[in-house]
Amino acid sequence: MMKIRSFFSLFFAPSLALERDDSSDYLSLVMVLLVMMATLLLSGASALEGGLVQWRGDLTGRITLQILYQEGGDSIDERASKAISLLQKAQGIKKVERVNDKQMSALLQPWLGEGDLPNDLPIPALIDISLVGATTPHILDDLKMILQSVPHIQLDDHGDWLQDVRKLVDWLVWLSYGLVIFITGTAMLIVVLLVRANVDRQFEMVELLHLVGATDALISWQFERHMALITLKGGVLGSFVAFIAASLVSHFIYQAEFMQVSPWNPVDHWPIFVLMPCVFVVLALLCAKRVCRRMLVELP
Amino acid sequence: MICFESVGLRYGTGPEVLKDITFTLEHGSFHFLTGASGAGKSSLLRLLYLAHRPSRGLINMFGQDVVSLPREKLPELRRQVGVVFQDFRLLNHLNVLENVALPLRASGQPEKAAMAHVSELLHWIGLGDVLQSKPTILSGGQQQRVAIARAVINRPRLLLADEPTGNVDNTIALRLLYLFEELNRLGTTVVIATHNEAMIRRFRYPHLHIEQGHLVQYMPDWQSES
């Protein structure tokens, strides 16, 4: 209780008017950049993870059946119809739908250009299978059993592709976290160096305050508050710039029709944009306090 | 009320600059602290205003044992001591009002009341028209008065002054001594370190004389002369 009371009395303690320090302006600018980078990285990592969950959600419970071209025997269309009829009778399958020519044209557009599909190309038929539940480990074997009378087919549950993407995303996310820690550490190192330089530069004042009866807590608070305000100013601006940047990137992803819905919507990640400056301020306060107190202990 | 007993002081691993200092300052007393340059006057003052702790011996101030007192208790004790430094130690980035208010702010007194008190004192000592001025534009005498105002603003029980008459002419020096006398009459214990023999003889207060780190004379001159 006493500690809480003394903290609040310190919080409203008078400013002992430290000498104005020009390097503070630069620190604010550095904080803008560091908080912006940290916020973007954390928000980006979060969006990446969220995006992967969304893709997995889209692809889980879905299997693509390819009816491949073969010389002689039944045509692709006949085999596709047979496969659809077999699948519709099977249990655990919610929906079976053949990808129509228009959709195929859209899928192959990057390679074949716009227009109808050419008849002389051995293009396979694609059948989209939606399962009642999620994809199970043995589903491909079960489907192969059902479709054993349909030759030249290929089943794909997107597992391999997702596995690779998962690894890449995991790697990127951990890299982002690592960079956020590195950036935060760099910011705090700058705070530590600046507090040390500040205390050294204003040592005459510090010693005088000490001699007129100021407590270590009050003297230290002057520097802590100074650092916290600089960090808050830089942090809020940095976070705001990061929010604008993320919004622009999100807009461009959406515009580029890379995805139906951009996974990086900064509004969804607002806690990151709000909390990051706060985290920086708290850490700056703690660093300034630790450095300052250690220096003040040198005084008798 | 202030008692030194066999006090020694050395800086780091250097030689002892104060040796076996023993004396007592009664409440409301007035002393001059004399001695040649380098004799140890400033070191003794530093012990008195708690800028150092002794290497050995006992110091008791206002009923507290300074040697064994925890560090966090010292600020409270320091607030009972006012110091006029030889070089004034005014902070040039603060104005006169803020400089004098420092001890009040440091002791956490309400800002409004503190400022009113400071303003009143500064008007009383004739600095009412320079409240917002920075120390750099003040004359030596004015700076000295600001330093004295800062030392007494907290109504200290012990007032220490290091060569307060060193940078001023005799008239101002005399006025300063009268001011210190006035404060002494109000109950403040005063110790003034000085070389000014004329002043010492004029005011005829007891003095502490230091020679090569030893307190060699404690009896006032005027008593021994009579």
Image (cartoon, coloured by chain):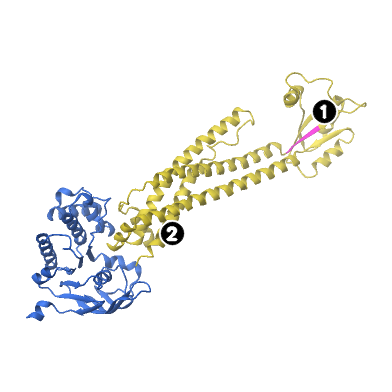
Asked whether B150 or A264 is in front, the reply is B150
User: Tag 2: residue type?
Assistant: Arg
Q: Is residue B109 visible?
A: no
Chain B as rendered: colour:
blue
Give the quarter of the image for residue B156.
bottom left
From this viewpoint, which residue is outermost toward the left? B226
From the viewer's perspective, is residue B91 above or below residue A242? below
The image shows residue A80, relative to residue A36, as above or below, that is above
Task: Characterize the local packing of mark 2: few (<14), some (14-19) or many (20 or more) Cα atoms within 10 angstroms.
Answer: some
Q: Where is residue A191? Give x, y as percent.
A: 44, 52
For the point 40% across and 54% down, the residue is A197
- The residue identified by callout 2 is A290
Quarter the C terminus of chain B occupies? bottom left
Residue sitting at x 30%, y 65%: B75
User: Disc 1 residue type?
Assistant: Pro
What span is colored magenta in the figure?
Answer: A61-65
Which residue is at 68% across, 39% downward? A56
Classify B143 as above or below B24.
Answer: above
Residue extending furthest front?
B37
